[in-house]
Image (cartoon, helix red, strand yellow):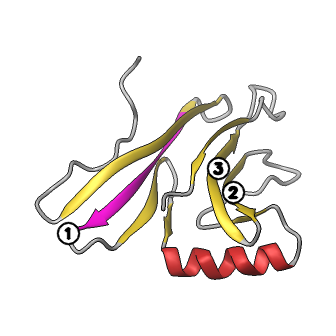
Amino acid sequence: MSKRLVKAPTSTDSYRYETLGYIEAYDAILNSDYAFVAYKETENNGDGRVRITGHQTAGAVFEPAAIKSQARAAGAQGKPWFQWGYSFDPGDGDKRNIQFRVHVTNGKASAIEMFVQLRKFDGSSDDPQSVQFPWPE
């Protein structure tokens, strides 16, 4: 495996970090690599959250109470997932698509997906890439 472009922090006396997922993609127009690492951050008192840190972009913080509320609302609306945190939505002039999706089952968060679709040299959309992992309990 090649060296990762972004990693979860190293655990300390105050915080424990657990890597949950990693994804890398190449944008030919910019000749640049994008990468994202998702990790669970747990404080000594047991409080925790999921964070996504990006190389080339911002990431996201998934606080359990906020995700619980949004998952309940999405479930009530019949939505299978909702976006959270940073996103780059494709448009006519730029086909890049970067989304952090929280999947919902029975009104509860069930998984997080990091979805990345960058561009080929001609500006068209490259193949989508995705990594998904269970919502940590």
Q: Which amino acid does the dot numbered 2 rest on?
A: Phe
Give the quadrant of residue 104: bottom right
Read off the magenta span. 33-44
Which residue is more in the foreground, 137 or 66?
137
Q: Nearer the viewer, mark 1 or mark 3?
A: 1
The kind of secondary structure element at disc 2 is: loop
Whether residue 112 is situated above or below residue 70 in the rendered picture? above
Which residue is more in the foreground, 73 or 121?
73
What is the tally of numbered marks visible in this picture? 3
The CA span between labels 3 and 2 is: 15 Å
- Tell me which residue sits at (40%, 19%) in the image: 2
Q: Position of residue 31 (x, y in %)?
A: 58, 29
Q: Position of residue 74 (x, y in %)?
A: 78, 74
Q: Relative to 84, is 7 on the left or the right? A: left
- Tell me which residue sits at (75%, 27%) in the image: 120
- Tell me which residue sits at (38%, 41%) in the image: 6
Q: Position of residue 90 (x, y in %)?
A: 80, 52
Q: Earlier in the sequence, mark 1 or mark 3?
A: 1
In contact (CB < 8 Å): disc 1 and disc 2: no
Look at the image and say whether residue 20 sits in the magenta stretch: no
Q: Which residue corresponds to mark 2?
A: 88
The kind of secondary structure element at disc 1 is: loop
The CA span between labels 1 and 3 is: 27 Å
Q: Position of residue 106 (x, y in %)?
A: 77, 68
Look at the image and say whether residue 39 sits in the magenta stretch: yes
Q: Which amino acid does the dot numbered 1 rest on?
A: Asn
Q: Nearer the viewer, mark 1 or mark 2?
A: 1
Q: Nearer the viewer, mark 3 or mark 2?
A: 3
The disc label shown at residue 113, or none: 3
Q: Which quarter of the rendered picture does the N terminus lie within? A: top left
Q: Which residue corresponds to mark 1?
A: 44
The residue carrying pointer 3 sits among few (fewer than 14), some (14 to 19) or many (20 or more) residues within 10 Å by Cα, namely many
